[in-house]
Image (cartoon, rainbow, N blue to C red):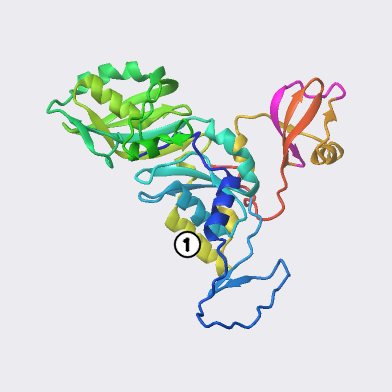
Amino acid sequence: MTMDPAHDTISGEQADQRDVQKNNFPDMGGNSEPHHEPRRVNNDPRARQQKGNQVRRDRRDVHGWVVLDKPIGMTSTQAVAVLKRLFNAKRAGHAGTLDPLASGGLPIALGEATKTVPFVMDGRKRYQFTVCWGEERDTDDIEGRATATSDQRPTREAILALLPRFTGVIEQIPPRYSAIKVQGERAYDLARDGEVVELAPRPVEIHHLTLVDQPDNDHAVFEAECGKGTYVRALARDMGRILGTFGHICALRRTLVGPFGENDMIPLDQLEALCDRAASGEGSLADALLPVETALDDIPALAVTRADAARLHRGQAVLLRGRDAPTCSGTVYVTVAGRLLALAEVGNGEIIPKRVFNLTGLTASPGRNERN
């Protein structure tokens, strides 16, 4: 499984652009006759647009996070496209690529939530993964071609003794099949073309690494909590080399991405069922959304008056005055009457807006701020 690190992600704007490029075909029609009646153009932006035999609904404003429990076999880009279709949303993007052969948490931002994607990307990730011993593969996962083999198998004691070497800040060489750019080209594209890809080691941080299970001599199950840019595939590769047995990833599940854990995840079939109920008037898609500000859990909140909110909404700075003025500095998210307004910087006695939110449209149901 070729898993890209968190910083190789698709923003909402990129996802929109890719979707437009993919679906915005010329209207070729289904009739090969040389003459066609002139088409009547409906300039009403609210109207549905019909191309061929397909009816395309106008997309709507949807704002919030959906943490998809991504099934095995689906790419992250496909997952974004599916949710964008289910919600009929104008904008969508994910916060950390998850490989097709991996399952688990894929946070998908809809609408104004795309402005908070970097805060999720910078958060910790937790993975549970299974290493298959005895074989190293060129992709460092089960999809690749075997490049080295060994009949030796590690003992539990040997594995446990090794774990401290992979905890803390370590130097890691990314897999050759990764999205890192080499002279403007993706490393995996060069590797697929048969070119030798030499990637420089770089520091990554692994906060915790534990041996969860050893079901047989050929497999070991681990849990790792790590920072941005860590490759679990490279972790398995390097452990196998040091143990003298070689190894590659044969199963991977992500259980934490920034503020989003397993309790936030929703399987695709449940999400589709909720959409069907909502279409029949028996529920609301808002029940599947987490608020935009969920991504900002680690950032201080700052409440302002409606008058100050009006200035910030126009992109104007607000002076901090009086003895009750906040003493915090740095990045904050600003609220007015309990509603998210902007991301801002506080310093030199003023609030300077950086990203202003317009949450008109479908948002999370009341009470979704109180997560399990």
Q: Is residue 167 above or below residue 250?
A: above
Residue 119 x/y as whole percent: 58, 33
Numbered range of the magenta stretch: 321-337
Quarter occupied by the N terminus = top left
Asked whether, in this view, residue 156 is left or right of residue 351, the answer is: left
Residue 59 x/y as whole percent: 63, 60
Residue 299 x/y as whole percent: 64, 29
Q: Nearer the viewer, residue 268 or 246?
A: 246
Q: Is residue 326 magenta?
A: yes
Q: What residue is at 45 percent from the left and 57 percent from the top?
A: 270
Asked whether, in this view, residue 67 is left or right of residue 41, the answer is: left
Residue where numbered disc 1 is placed:
273
| Image-quadrant location for residue 320 | top right
Q: Nearer the viewer, residue 3 or 201?
A: 201
Asked whether, in this view, residue 190 is left or right of residue 48, the answer is: left
Secondary structure state at the residue bearing disc 1: helix
- Given the current orientation, which residue lies at the most extreme front position? 34
Q: What residue is at 26 percent from the left and 16 percent from the top?
A: 161
Q: Nearer the viewer, residue 302 or 369?
A: 302
